């Protein structure tokens, strides 16, 4: 079996999804690929974060 040499770069999590990177939860690495699966382990890649950060604005409105 032939091994493929792939370049992996460290990317900040905040900007990675917006720049087209996908995250492998098993390898814990961001990949810039058009594929759906991780090129190393074959698990499905995430293309959006699991949790959204809470915004500074409140969702609740005070009613007098």
Image: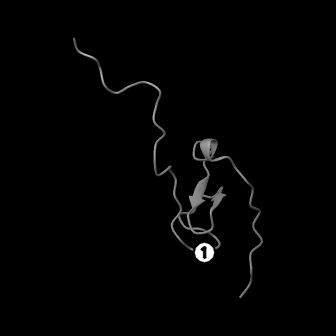
Mark 1: few/some/many CA within 10 Å (<14, 14-19, 20+) = few
Image quarter hosting the C terminus: top left
Residue at screen point 74% across, 61% down? 8
Q: Position of residue 35 (x, y in %)?
A: 57, 63
Front-lying residue, 45 or 29? 29
Q: Residue furthest left?
A: 64
| In the image: residue 36, left or right of residue 12 | left
Residue 49's place in the image compared with 37, above or below, is: above
Residue 60 is drawn in which quadrant? Answer: top left
Q: Residue furthest top?
A: 64
Residue 2's place in the image compared with 32, above or below, is: below
Residue at screen point 46% across, 52% down? 50
Residue 34 is drawn in which quadrant? Answer: bottom right
Q: How is the image coloured?
A: one colour
Q: Position of residue 6 (x, y in %)?
A: 75, 67
Count all numbered tags in the image, as a single digit.
Answer: 1
Residue at screen point 29% across, 20% down? 61
Residue 19's place in the image compared with 58, above or below, is: below
| In the image: residue 60, left or right of residue 13 | left
Q: Position of residue 5 (x, y in %)?
A: 78, 71
Residue designated by label 1:
41
Front-lying residue, 10 or 57? 57
Front-lying residue, 15 or 1? 15
Indicate the secondary structure of the residue bearing disc 1.
loop
Residue 1 is drawn in which quadrant? Answer: bottom right
Q: Residue furthest bottom?
A: 1
Q: Position of residue 31 (x, y in %)?
A: 65, 58
């Amino acid at each position: 079996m032939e091994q493929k040499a792939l370049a992996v770069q460290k990317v900040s999590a905040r900007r990675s999804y917006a720049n087209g990177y996908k995250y492998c939860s098993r390898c814990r690495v961001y990949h810039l690929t058009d594929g759906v699966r991780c090129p190393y382990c074959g698990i499905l890649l995430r293309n959006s974060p699991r949790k959204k950060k809470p915004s500074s604005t409140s969702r609740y409105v005070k009613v007098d």
